[in-house]
Image (tube, rainbow, N blue to C red):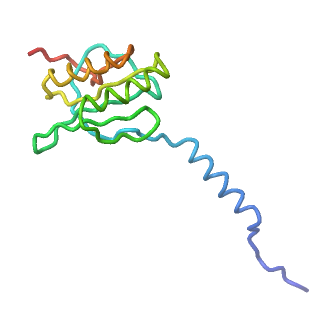
Amino acid sequence: MKTAEAAIPTASMADIAFLLIIFFMVTTVHELDRTTVNAPKAQNFEEAEKGAAIVVIHRQPTGELIYKWSDGEEMSDVRNGPGDIYLEASRIAYDNPNKQFLIKSDGDIEFRYIDELMDELRKAGVKRLLLLTSPGEAEMG
C-alpha cells in the first residue's frame, strides 16, 4: 500500500497575496496634513469636502509661526507665508472656482494672522472657505 504525502497547494498563494495588496491599497485613507493643532471649539460645524485645499497655521514651541499648504491632492509642505499661499490658491481658484479651502489653525493663534491669510485667499479668488473647529462650547473672550 502506498501512502500519499501531505502537501499544501501553493499555486494560488500569489493570487491571494495580490488581491490582498489591492484591497488594502484601495481602502487605505491618506492624510494630506498630519499637523496636530488645538482647534478652537464651535457649536455649529460643516463637514469639509474630500479633496479640499488645506492651509495650516501652526506655532512651533520656539514661538515661530509655520504656514503649510496642500492642494487637497498632495501632502502638505511648508510655505514662507500668506504671500506664497496666495500664489498657490490663485492658481487653484482660477482652474476650479468652486474648490473648497480649509484653514487649520491652533486655537491660540492671534486672529490677525488668520485674518491676513483669509484676505490673501479672498484676493486669490477663493469663494468657499472653512475654518477647522472641534465640537464643543465656543469660547468667547
| Extreme-right residue of the structure | 1
The answer to whether 9 appears left or right of 86 in the picture is right
| Extreme-bottom residue of the structure | 1
Q: Say above or below: 53 vs 6.
A: above
State the residue in front, 95 or 32.
95
The answer to whether 138 appears left or right of 1 in the picture is left
At 21% from the left and 36% from the top, the residue drawn is 58
State the residue in front, 11 or 94.
94
State the residue in front, 19 or 97.
97
Residue 21 place in picture, x, y as percent: 61, 53
Residue 132 lies in what quarter of the image?
Answer: top left
The answer to whether 113 appears left or right of 10 in the picture is left
Residue 133 place in picture, x, y as percent: 27, 23
At 76% from the left and 74% from the top, the residue drawn is 7
Q: Say above or below: 129 vs 73.
A: above
Residue 35 place in picture, x, y as percent: 29, 40
The answer to whether 14 appears left or right of 24 in the picture is right
Quarter containing the C terminus: top left
Quarter containing the N terminus: bottom right
At 44% from the left and 39% from the top, the residue drawn is 74
Residue 2 lies in what quarter of the image?
Answer: bottom right
Residue 22 place in picture, x, y as percent: 63, 48
At 17% from the left and 25% from the top, the residue drawn is 113
Q: Say above or below: 122 vs 81.
A: above
